[in-house]
Image (tube, grey):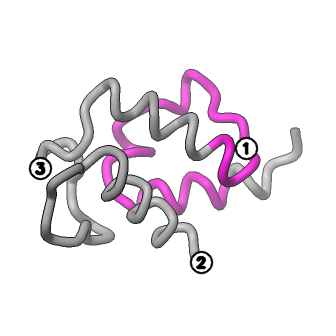
Amino acid sequence: MDTQTALGNYIQKELAIGRKKPILPDEDLFASGVLDSLGVLQLVLFVEEQFGIKVADEDVVLENFQTLDAMALYIASRQGAVA
């Protein structure tokens, strides 16, 4: 399963409960009401566990979590980083 699919499935199942339409890769998750500050915290925990990376506090910004595309790019950049 690719990164965007895993993220979309998690968000749909755990954070956007009751939402019928799928989450698009470029959909603004904050503007659409899918994510809020608590949802971001849950999502960060999922990302760390699912993808084996550490999300630094300074990386928890709108640019990294606004869309599935942005999250996938962020995760890819962190997976290539040396710890």
**Side of 16 where 9 appears, left or right:** right
Q: Which of marks 1 and 2 is in front?
A: 2
Mark 2 lies on a secondary structure that is loop
Residue 68 placed where, x, y %? 38, 61
Decide: few, some or many residues near mark 3? Use Cα within 10 Å; few <14, some 14-19, many ≥20: few
Residue 46 placed where, x, y %? 56, 43
Q: Give the distance between the C-alpha atoms of the residues marked 1 and 2, in whole angstroms.
A: 17 Å
Residue type, numbered disc 1 = Ile
Q: Give the range drawn in magenta.
A: 48-77
Residue name at image x 80 percent, y 49 percent = 81
* For residue 43, above or below residue 73: above
Q: Earlier in the sequence, mark 3 or mark 1?
A: 3
Residue indicated by mark 2:
1
Asked whether residue 72 is drawn in magenta, I would say yes
Q: Quadrant of residue 56?
A: top right
Residue 79 placed where, x, y %? 75, 55
Pick the front one: 73 or 19:
19
Quarter holding the C terminus? Answer: top right
Asked whether residue 27 is drawn in magenta, I would say no
Decide: few, some or many residues near mark 2? Use Cα within 10 Å; few <14, some 14-19, many ≥20: few
Residue name at image x 48 percent, y 30 percent = 60
Pick the front one: 41 or 26:
41
Label annotation for residue 53: 1
Residue type, numbered disc 2 = Met
